Image (tube, grey):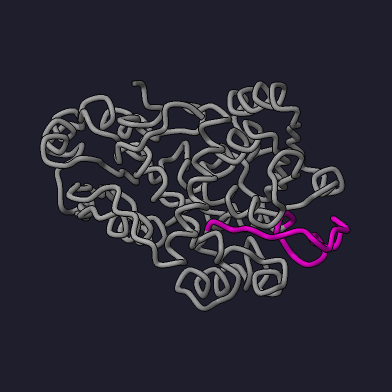
């Protein structure tokens, strides 16, 4: 009998139907409940998982590691300096080797093509922990957190503030509209999402009844907001653009004035983290010294406010990643969704 998820890779939101994505979110909530109650769920007993990290990570690495162990699997971390991926050995050759030794592979790096090649040539499920184009495991955690707070996804309005052409904005647009969430991108014109991403999201919105808005007008952006979401102004690999981004994105900072503009006391604030909300980091101190800015994409006031749900969101990375690994590798009976 055909199984919906078994053997599939998780590379981008657009590869999955609305029903499949919503199933994974609900399955994540179930696994979260099992963990809270101390109920074992070793669906991957005896499996070996390769964790390939070209980019550094806190949440993604910790989430994949703990999720694998909770599922009874053995995770093996392979960092940028540990293997030859794409340098002395092609992605295809690396994939063929790892696929003979591991039962599943996670990849976090720059190139979407690389994670796709790993899936194409390894013969095992491959999970995208982040590339420059998409961040699908983050989306499951984000929308699980939203559903936990509002009891639904359809009809919710999410406002993303900041760099509108990064991987998180791309993924929020596609995953959100897929599931009936209205997605507003509040960004300067120079950082609007790519046209093909917007068109893809608009196609999903037409089917789900959601709407898409890309604007640099604050009053348009915040109208009907249930969720404010932001990300760092400078993505990994773009550190030379700090000055340009600080100048460009200051009007798009999530601060209490912006929160109050939405006129919704039940709204929540999300951030995929890390966040530059103070000067207690090397980057934070450096930016404060060079540009006189002590808070970047979100103020410390909002970050620590009653609206904040980013630590719930961070925890949910583990539960949602667990759901993806179990569903695609655990031989679970899921003939339809």
Task: Tell me if residue 126 comes above or below residue 76 in the rendering.
Answer: above
Residue 259 belongs to magenta span: yes
Question: In the image, which residues are magenta?
Answer: 251-272
Q: Residue at x 21, y 26 (%)?
A: 121
Q: Choose top left, top right, bottom left or bottom right for residue 75.
A: bottom left
Residue at 40% x, 67% y is: 38
Residue found at x 17% / y 49%:
46
Instruction: Tell me, yes or no, whether the highlighted magenta stretch contains residue 1.
Output: no
- Residue 151 position, x and y percent, is 70, 51
Relative placement, left or right, of 115 versus 280 is left
Q: How many numbered discs, if any?
A: 0
- Across and down, in percent, residue 178 comes to 62, 31
- In x, y percent, where is residue 68? 29, 54
Which quarter shows the N terminus?
top left
Front residue (pair 282, 203): 203
Question: In the displayed structure, does residue 135 sit left or right of residue 106?
Answer: right
Q: Is residue 169 left or right of residue 75?
A: right
* Residue located at (68% from left, 57% from top): 149
Quadrant of residue 58 in the image? bottom left
Please determine whether, in this image, residue 248 is positioned above or below residue 255.
above
Judging depth in this view, the residue of 8 and 201 nearest the camera is 8
Residue that sits furthest to the bottom in the current view: 280
Picture coordinates of residue 194 (x, y %)?
59, 30
Q: Quadrant of residue 215?
A: top right
């Amino acid at each position: 009998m055909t199984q919906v998820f078994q053997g599939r890779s998780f590379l981008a939101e657009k590869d999955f139907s609305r029903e499949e994505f919503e199933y994974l979110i609900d399955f994540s909530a179930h696994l979260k409940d099992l963990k809270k109650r101390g109920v074992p769920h070793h669906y991957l007993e005896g499996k070996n998982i390769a964790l390939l990290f070209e980019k550094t990570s806190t949440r993604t690495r910790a989430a994949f590691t703990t999720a694998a162990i909770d599922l009874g699997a053995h995770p093996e971390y392979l960092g940028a300096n540990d293997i030859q991926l794409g340098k002395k050995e092609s992605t295809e050759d690396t994939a063929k080797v790892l696929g003979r030794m591991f039962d599943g592979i996670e990849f976090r790096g720059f190139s979407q093509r690389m994670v796709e090649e790993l899936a194409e040539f390894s013969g095992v499920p491959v999970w995208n922990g982040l590339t420059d184009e998409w961040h699908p495991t983050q989306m499951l955690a984000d929308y699980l957190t939203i559903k936990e707070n509002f009891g639904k996804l359809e009809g919710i309005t999410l406002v993303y503030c900041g760099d509108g052409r990064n991987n998180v904005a791309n993924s929020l647009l596609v995953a959100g509209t897929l599931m009936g969430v209205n997605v507003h991108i509040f960004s300067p014109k120079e950082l609007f999402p790519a046209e093909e991403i917007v068109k893809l999201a608009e196609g999903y919105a037409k089917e789900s009844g959601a709407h898409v808005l890309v604007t640099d007008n604050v009053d348009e952006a915040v109208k009907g907001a249930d969720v404010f979401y932001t990300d760092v102004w400078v993505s990994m690999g773009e550190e030379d653009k700090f000055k340009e981004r600080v100048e460009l994105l200051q009007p798009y900072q999530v601060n209490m004035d912006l929160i109050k503009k939405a006129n919704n006391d039940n709204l929540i604030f999300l951030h995929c983290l890390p966040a530059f909300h103070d000067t207690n980091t090397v980057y934070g101190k450096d930016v404060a010294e060079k540009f006189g800015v002590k808070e970047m994409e979100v103020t410390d006031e909002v970050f620590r406010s009653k609206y904040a749900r980013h630590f719930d969101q961070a925890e949910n990375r583990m539960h949602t990643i667990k759901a993806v690994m179990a569903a695609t590798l655990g031989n679970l009976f899921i003939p339809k969704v």
